[in-house]
Amino acid sequence: CIQQVPISSTAKDNQSATTEFILLGFGDLHGLRLLPFVSFLFTYLIAVSGNMLVVFVVLADRSLRTPMYFFLGNLSWLEICYVSTVVPKMLKTLLSEREVISLVGCITQLYVFGSLGISECLLLSVMSFDRYLAICHPLSYSAIMNFRVCLLLAAGSWAAGFTVPLISIVMLFRLPFCRSNEIDHFFCDLMPLLKLLCAGAHKIEVVTFSFAAGIVLVPCLLTLVSYCRIILTISRIPSATGKKKAFSTCSAHLLVVSIFYGALILIYGVPIGNQSPGLNKAISVLYTVLTPTVNPLIYSLRNKEVKGALLKIAMKAV
């Protein structure tokens, strides 16, 4: 079922351009496919329903029309798109063992997934800056984080996310794949895909690492600096109860951010030749499945304001 077409005469005679790929998924699980399928399906449903609940509450309750919840609503919508780009195909791969995907479909998945990942990096940085202003500079917070600024920051995160990967995607489309038509992954990720190129993989790798340094590391550092300043401010709170609660919230945020950024750096900060397919898949599960699932709980559903809004909506429904 694999279609191949000839490439240019300048290439070697035995090379051909692959137009379809086979996703190998998690490999041979020796008949134990049902358990991971059910686990990932259950996790996917939790991730989508949890994030949808946050979006619904933020839109439905006027008391949540604040910069913090505006950004949280954006993050939840992004997470729905993010997890839906990867997990449905992963589930099909678990059922069929070897899932076929076209070249166009594969690179489209790569582009959308990469764009959403970059947007999330930027949005997390914006959210940490918002919390920094609210906690460390409360008197000037309202004047700085007005609706126009919030809209520009959110729109800028989305726009940059869907613009930055275009260079790598265009370069990828212009190069032939001929080493194999099997992708040793559960979705079309960049690094496993680069291993299949006849030539030019190093150029794309350099471009990707260059952008990753700016798009991943800089927002990561800004996020960490913001939380460090927040923790210093919290440490001056006289109330032990208030200090404990604030530290608990910040530590939970930092844990999720560390998992997300740490996984991205481990995947995209290591050269292709030094990557282990099995480890790559395991780490990928952290930022493609785990973080979209826990983010609604960590950032939103534990908040008193969200719980209160949910209670009001439930009472109106009854």
Image (cartoon, rainbow, N blue to C red):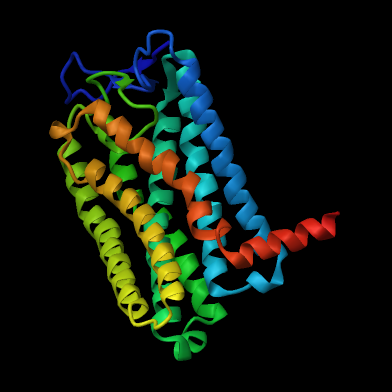
Compared to 12, does 118 lie above or below?
below
Depth order, front residue of 309/240: 240
Q: Position of residue 55 (x, y in %)?
A: 62, 56
Q: Quadrant of residue 223?
A: bottom left
Depth order, front residue of 104/58: 58
Q: Quadrant of residue 191?
A: top left
Residue ID at (19%, 36%): 201
Residue ID at (83%, 55%): 317
Quadrant placement of the N terminus? top left
Residue ID at (37%, 77%): 234
Which residue lies most toward the front here? 240
Which residue lies most toward the top here? 31
Q: Quadrant of residue 124?
A: bottom left
Compared to 284, does 317 lie above or below?
below
Report whether residue 209 is seen.
yes
Depth order, front residue of 149/256: 256
Which residue lies most toward the bottom here? 139
Q: Position of residue 94 (x, y in %)?
A: 46, 19
Q: Position of residue 289 (x, y in %)?
A: 44, 39
Report whether residue 200 is seen.
no
Badge count: 0
Which residue lies most toward the right here? 318
Residue ID at (20%, 54%): 210
Q: Position of residue 235 (x, y in %)?
A: 33, 77
Quadrant placement of the C terminus? bottom right
